[in-house]
Image (cartoon, rainbow, N blue to C red):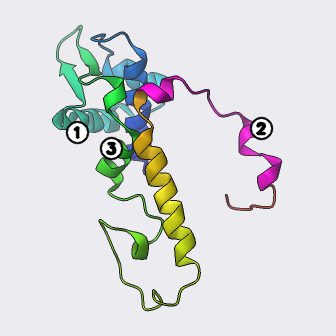
Amino acid sequence: MKISKKTDYALRALVMLAEQEPGTLVSIRHLAEANDIPKRFLEQIMLDLRERGWVRGVTGRIGGYALAIPADMLTMGHVVRHFDGVIAPIGCVSVARYEPCSQETRCRFRRVFLDARNHAARMLDRLTLADLLRTHPVSTADVRDLAFSDGAGI
């Protein structure tokens, strides 16, 4: 599974809004700069998030954005599915965007991708913005864990 830039940027902005005291407005400029997101692209994303009812926006000189729902009510799964549509790594194990394959009845690795989809979906559907605030950023050592050193392309 690889998420789009749109999903990545939406999650960055939402987590930053979740870090604020409830009702605190954050300007689009500050959201963009602090999260290294192109401002024009972020403006489109924030409009989309507002239409979903996940954020509220206030226009004007002292305006900005704030979460419109509690941080424990919005999951990563909601955001990923909204922007990317699916979590499945291949079409033949997708529910929303199923793509038939001539090898489905005898494929030996389809099960692995189905299990990966199910694990990812459970994890993303369980983790809320509030949960993310309680996690620690990933270090380079975490990414280069020796248990996966033979996994070129991970």
| Range covered by the magenta-colored residues | 130-148
The amino acid type of the residue labelled 2 equals: Ala
Q: Earlier in the sequence, mark 3 or mark 1?
A: 1
Residue 14: x and y in percent read 37, 29
Residue 105: x and y in percent read 46, 89
Element carrying mark 1 = helix
Task: Check disc 1 and report the residue beneath it.
Answer: 48
| Front residue of 12 and 129 | 129
Q: Earlier in the sequence, mark 2 or mark 3?
A: 3
Q: Are marks 2 and 1 in contact (CB under 8 Å)?
A: no
**Label for residue 141?**
2
Residue 113: x and y in percent read 53, 69
| Front residue of 130 and 86 | 130
Residue 131: x and y in percent read 47, 28
Vertical order, 60 against 80 (above or below): above
Task: Check disc 3 and report the residue beneath it.
Answer: 78
